[in-house]
C-alpha cells in the first residue's frame, strides 16, 4: 500500500536490547524487506552477531567503527556496508554525536 507519513509520528524503540547498548530504531517498512532508521547514541554498540538474512547499512551521519567478519571499516556519512546472510558483523558509535544509518534486512530468498 502506497503512503506518505511523518517520521516524527513513528515511535522509536530499542533495537534488539539483548545484543545492543543504546541502539534505537524507527521501522519504516516491514514487508519482504525490513527498513529501519537506526540511531546509535554515543558509546552505543551492536554486538558481534550473525543473522539468517543479509543486511545493507547506509550510514547517514556520525562516526563509528564496524566489522564484517575480520574486516574493520570506518562508519561515517556516505559509507555503505553489505553483509551476507550468516556473516559475523557489528558496529559501534565512537563519536560524541548520534551515529545514524538506514538498515535494510533482506531475506535470503530475495
Image (cartoon, rainbow, N blue to C red):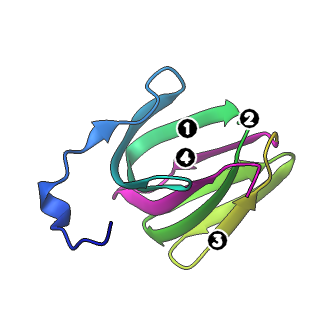
- Closer to viewer: mark 2 or mark 4: 2
* Residue on which disc 4 sits: 92
**CA separation in Å, label 3 and label 1:** 17 Å
The part of the image, by quadrant, that contains residue 37 is bottom left
Mark 3 vs mark 4: in front: 3
34 or 8, which is in the foreground? 34
Q: Which of these two is toward me, 13 or 43?
A: 13
Point out the image quarter for the N terminus. bottom left
- Which of marks 4 and 3 precedes in the sequence? 3
Q: Residue at x 42, y 58 (%)?
A: 99
Q: Residues within 10 Å of mark 1 (few under 14, many from 20)?
A: many
Residue located beneath label 1 in the image: 46
Distance from the alpha carbon under mark 2 to that under mark 3: 18 Å
Decide: few, some or many residues near mark 3? Use Cα within 10 Å; few <14, some 14-19, many ≥20: some
Secondary structure, mark 3, is strand
Q: Which residues are magenta?
A: 87-110
SS for callout 2: loop
Give the spatial CA distance, label 3 vs label 4. Answer: 15 Å
| Disc with the residue nearer the chain's start (4 vs 1) | 1
Q: Position of residue 17 (x, y in %)?
A: 43, 25
Q: Residue furthest right?
A: 70
Residue at image position (35%, 56%) is 98
Q: Mark 3 touching mark 1, by CB under 8 A?
A: no
Query: Which label lies toward us, 1 or 2?
Result: 2
Give how far across and how far down residue 30 sits, in percent.
43, 50
Q: Which residue is label 3 attached to?
A: 80
Secondary element at image label 1: strand
The residue identified by callout 2 is: 50
Task: Determine whether label 4 and label 1 are within 8 Å by CB.
Answer: yes
Amino acid at each position: 500500500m502506497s503512503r506518505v507519513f511523518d517520521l516524527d509520528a513513528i515511535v522509536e524503540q530499542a533495537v534488539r536490547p539483548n545484543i545492543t547498548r543504546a541502539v534505537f530504531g524507527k521501522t519504516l517498512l516491514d514487508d519482504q524487506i525490513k527498513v529501519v532508521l537506526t540511531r546509535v547514541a554515543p558509546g552505543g554498540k551492536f554486538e558481534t552477531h550473525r543473522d539468517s538474512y543479509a543486511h545493507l547499512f547506509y550510514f547517514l551521519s556520525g562516526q563509528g567503527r564496524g566489522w564484517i567478519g575480520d574486516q574493520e571499516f570506518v562508519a561515517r556519512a556516505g559509507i555503505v556496508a553489505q553483509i551476507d546472510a550468516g556473516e559475523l558483523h557489528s558496529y559501534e558509535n565512537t563519536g560524541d554525536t548520534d551515529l545514524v544509518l538506514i538498515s535494510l534486512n533482506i531475506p535470503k530468498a530475495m
